[in-house]
Amino acid sequence: MKEPIFFQPVFKEMLWGGSRLRSEYGYPIPSDHTGEAWVISAHPHGDCQAVSGPFRGKTLSWLWSNHPELFGNTGGSEFPLLVKIIDARDNLSIQVHPDDAYAKSHENGSLGKTECWYVLDCDPGATIVVGHNAESKEALRRMIDEKQWSDLIRTRPIKKGDFFQIEPGTVHAIQKGTLILETQQSSDITYRLYDYDRLQNGRPRELHIEKSIDVIRCPHRDFACTEKPLQGDGFSRVNLVTCPFYQVDKWDIETSVSIPHTYPFLIVSVLEGTGTVSKVPVKKGDHFILPYGYGSFLTEGSLSLITSHI
Ligand code: ZN
């Protein structure tokens, strides 16, 4: 079977979430504090169901286990990527993720988490946290002990279309008024460093100070994103990042383009517009996987896409 497999998002209600997943994408969110739509995920905390084709109703983890040929028989016990849309009405906690080696030994063999953010939209004046100002682990521990949060964390302004690669060990936080598409390793391991002393159901959320100090890279180094734009006839493509875990590209298409697909599988997210992919209708907010062997495909219509693959 060689057809796109569309998936139903899994929604996550969050202290900091909002209602833009409904107002922007028409998703049937459970409440007005919905923070995340896991749009392509086989993670046990949110396993997406296929909503099209012969595998309708089956989860992505089931497909990965039972039809490895769809994914080029790449091996590995779990589908390696997770794509989310995040609606931050309020600030997310200041956090950090472990790498594969630390997660494997401290988190029951879980994958670590490298993630990247494409800013879909944000309020004027919106900011984001990436990095910190401690020169050493000793300085980091002292600043945390003394709650010098504003001196410690690096906040920077953002605008629509910005892109950030967040390596393991990077202190980070998405902040209020921001809509982001996140592509990440399939992992749900987050160490919360600081949560603005907020209460959830009358209690502060759990912090993970020691694990955070273990994994935070000191001093911080900014990841140098070398976005490589490619201008074609009626389209532009930008390679946002290529790292050991994924490659992510942004496509802005005016009328039509042939997109190559020579990968074990290709994830496609429709950010804007309506059109077709190999004559199959697609629209803003759709997310689908093109299986192994699907080959190059033709899009039609004015579309803005993000594609990702391992
Ligand atoms: Zn994160």
Image: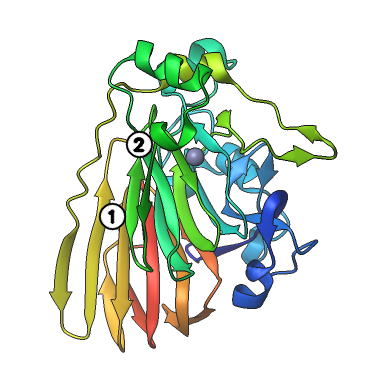
Q: Amino acid at mark 2?
A: Gly
For image coordinates 32% across by 65% down, the residue present is 250
For image coordinates 61% across by 47% down, the residue present is 60
Circle 2 is placed at which residue position?
Answer: 131
Q: Nearer the viewer, residue 297 or 201?
A: 201
Q: Amino acid at mark 1?
A: Thr
Within 10 Å of disc 2 (Cα), the crowding (few <14, some 14-19, many 20+) is: many
Q: Quadrant of the C terminus?
A: top left
Q: Is residue 194 visible?
A: yes
Circle 1 is placed at which residue position?
Answer: 262
For image coordinates 75% across by 69% down, the residue present is 28
Q: Position of residue 197 (x, y in %)?
A: 67, 35
Q: Seen in the image, is 241 located left or right of residue 303?
A: left
Q: Position of residue 29 (x, y in %)?
A: 75, 64
Residue 139, placed above or below residue 205:
above
For image coordinates 69% across by 38% down, the residue present is 45
- State the SS at label 2: strand
Q: Position of residue 271 (x, y in %)?
A: 46, 72
Q: Is residue 190 visible?
A: no
Q: Are marks 1 and 2 in contact (CB under 8 Å)?
A: no
Residue 55, placed above or below residue 59:
below
Residue 37 badge:
none
Q: Nearer the viewer, residue 86 or 125?
A: 125
Does the Cβ of the disc 2 residue fall within 8 Å of ligand 1?
A: no
Q: Position of residue 221 (x, y in %)?
A: 24, 32
Q: Nearer the viewer, mark 1 or mark 2?
A: 2
Of marks 1 and 2, which one's residue comes earlier in the chain? Answer: 2
Within 10 Å of disc 1 (Cα), the crowding (few <14, some 14-19, many 20+) is: few
Q: How many marks?
A: 2
Q: Nearer the viewer, residue 211 or 202?
A: 202
- State the SS at label 1: loop
The Cα atoms of the two marked residues, 1 and 2, are separated by 35 Å
